Image (cartoon, rainbow, N blue to C red):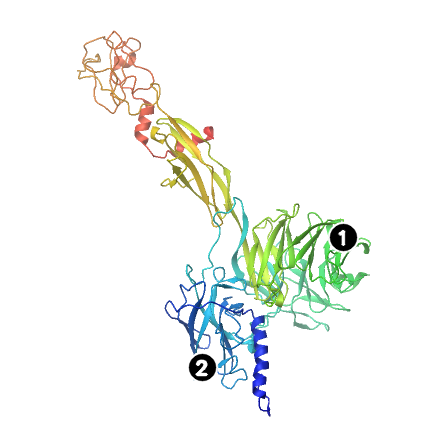
Amino acid sequence: MTSTPGTAPGGQSRLRRRAGTAAVAALLLAGIPVGAAVSADAGTPKTATGPQGQKLTVSANTGLDPAGQKVRVQGEGYGLTTGIYVALCKDNGDNRVPSPCLGGADMSGGSKTSQWIVPPGDPYEGDLAQAFGPGGTFDVEIEIAQKGDGLDCAEVACSVVTRADHRAAGDRTQDVRIPVAFAGQDPGDGGGEGVDVPAGTISYKSAAEFTTAGKPLDLLLHPDSKKLYVGADNLPDTADVDERGLHVLNPETGTSESWISQAPGSTGALRASAAARIAGPLPGDGVVYNYPLRGVGSAKSGDEAASGVWLTGSTITDIAPGTTPDTVLVAQGATLSEIERATGTATRTLTLPGGTQFAADPERGALWYTDFAAGKMHRVDLTSFTVSGSFDLPGGPGGMAGFTETDPATGAVWVGVDRSVLVFDAAGTLVKTLVGKDLARDAAFDTASGRAYVVRQDGGDLSDPANDNNGTLTVYGTEDFAVAAKVLSLPGNHSQAGAASLAVEPGGTTVFVTSPAEGKITKLVRQVSPLVTRAPADLTAKEGEEVALTAEAEGAPEPTVRWQVSTDGAQTWKDVEGATESALTFTARTAQDGYRYRAEFRNDVGTTGTAAVTLTVTAATGGDTGGDVGGDTGGNGDASNGVGSTEGDGAAGGDGGTQTSGGSTNGGSDSTGGSGSTGTSGGSSGTVGGSGSTVGGGVAGGTGTAATSGGGSLAATGATVMSVTLLAAGLVGPGVLVHRRARRRTEGAL
């Protein structure tokens, strides 16, 4: 806007007031809300450089007070021909307008919640804006807070920015950004989620944002080539490039593989054309789509231009695959036609009472045509091409048009009207109304999981208390219509610049959602909190026996596990050192009797623990594995020809004295005293000493059979026999994991 020559006295003030009113409206539409708390400066200054050498400095950008912070913002080197806004905004990345903004529209010129800087002599200078100083400088304060108007800088990246004012909305040369972080954040850190959620909770998180396809209007993930086709219009943010057309993206990275920008117009000559709506896939690769106003085209990755036909009649309002591979169904207002794609000739035409969009169900030979203005839905029989039924849309005439889609698995019709989704069965009976807080804009179905995905957009008008700039993605079961995943907020996705659309990868592992207002496609990946699929059970073991506890869980990302133990009846828990595998194996000790164990599984979504189980350890008996058994070994003796007997205190073996014995009953000298071995006495029947005395190291430390003297073969050769069980216990020791044996035991115990 410029000054009007010959303005009467006082006219400049009136002009400023009128200009101020327009500016306030522009700021509100840009999403700059009102109000923030005030506190003292903190932190250290941070500087960034703009695309034209501008220098932007903010007094503090980290550790800011979430409740409110006043910061000083300085700039130099800005052009003297373009006005700018200074504010705290959602940072949408390079070549994207920073918006919405927190900080406020300054309606009085004194609140300083945001600042407007204009060239000297600009008609806005004075009441609402201040002028640049020499060399394109400015020095202002703004008051910022972490949260306001539905945007939270703990959830999305925020920056203190300069951006061109509303008179140059597509000018990105004034964008200079300094990321900020409030207390507890790192700059650009969106925070996280996922602790203490129910086991098996499904949610989605943003994995990437694609900004390579202009202003995205429609999506199709090709079932054969797996390429992501995007119908797009031009994005005002990028005024230097006209991005209209059909874009083909790599769905993993978002990189552009092809861009078909031209299609035949009314004269047949090629021209730049947006891709308004994608009808469906072509075999192998490629899609059929509608380009404004009446074009029906087809193209695949690598094509230089689309092939197509230009229809007569009114503007195309919807399009879908026809009943044969060479035809498409086209809505031109209340007229439904099936046309040949090669020639544009209509093979069948039907005029309905009214309507704009439809959904075809070729499996059941039906087409559902919605007339939002009249509050009606009509069923068309695709065989006879006649209306076979009409149904009321609850809420009456005049509902805001959202979408009409059919579930290919059940034939149910899902209709988005205002903030509701109306679900009709294949016979046209209303079976469910799903109400949300935002406008229902598109739906897609995953038949593999039996789920429907609905994207909703905020109205975008911040003067309406019901609006907050955030859209939502909701997942429903198609049988019970219950919410099947955590509702996901879509910050900044509003309907002011076009309706959102979505595409779902088979299986529902990945979802793509468009945001026309932001000029981006968000790639969402499915997450599942850990769900235990195998839990440990209470276990009883004997002293020295190896035990194994096993637990397993599934989730996305794949969960990790750690084992925990409680020694005080589950009052407190501590991690078992090094226990990060599904099986926990160890040697049971009597000191562990009554200990409780559990496994805890973790991933980015949440933490899930198994129920605590109890370990019961019983003491070893004479026939069991020897542990810390008492007694002394027999006295000194002399080995002589393999014949010997016990002398001294040989009543009960110590910690395992090894002794061999021949066949005599008394007085021999072939005893081996000491500790640490298994007491074994050769022989086959008679007791050592002839009268029943116990050989040193026998019963208490042995293998379950008191070895006796008596001339057996071991006695005859003088060989030493050691308990296998005690040998294993000695090699393993307390707390050592023996995985090979544990696996064998686990299979039997659990």
| Residue situated furthest top in the rendering | 691
Question: Residue 543 appears at what percent x and percent y?
Answer: 35, 26
Question: Residue 568 appears at what percent x and percent y?
Answer: 38, 35
Q: Horizontally, is 187 left or right of 638 in the view?
A: right
Residue 668 visible in rendering: yes
Residue 76's place in the image compared with 435, above or below, is: below
Question: Residue 285 appears at what percent x and percent y?
Answer: 63, 57
Under mark 1, the amino acid is Ala
| Residue situated furthest bottom in the rendering | 6
Q: Which residue is mark 2?
A: 136
Badge 1 density bin: few <14, some 14–19, many ≥20, Cα 10 Å = many
Residue 222 visible in rendering: no
Q: Nearer the viewer, mark 1 or mark 2?
A: 2
Badge 2 density bin: few <14, some 14–19, many ≥20, Cα 10 Å = many
Q: Quadrant of the N terminus?
A: bottom right
Residue 580's place in the image compared with 66, above or below, is: above
516 or 234, which is in the foreground?
516
625 or 4, which is in the foreground?
4
Q: How many marks?
A: 2
Q: Which residue is mark 1?
A: 366
Q: Secondary structure at mark 2?
A: loop
Q: Horizontally, is 567 left or right of 20 in the view?
A: left
For residue 687, the mark is: none
Is tag 1's residue or tag 2's residue first in the polypeptide sequence?
2
Q: Residue at x 46, y 79 (%)?
A: 78
Q: Secondary structure at mark 1?
A: strand
585 or 2, which is in the foreground?
2
306 or 154, which is in the foreground?
154
Under mark 2, the amino acid is Gly
Given contact means CB atoms under 8 Å apart, are the residues at marks 1 and 2 in contact?
A: no
Q: Spatial distance from mark 1 to mark 2, Cα to Cα?
A: 64 Å
Question: Residue 726 appears at what percent x and percent y?
Answer: 31, 25
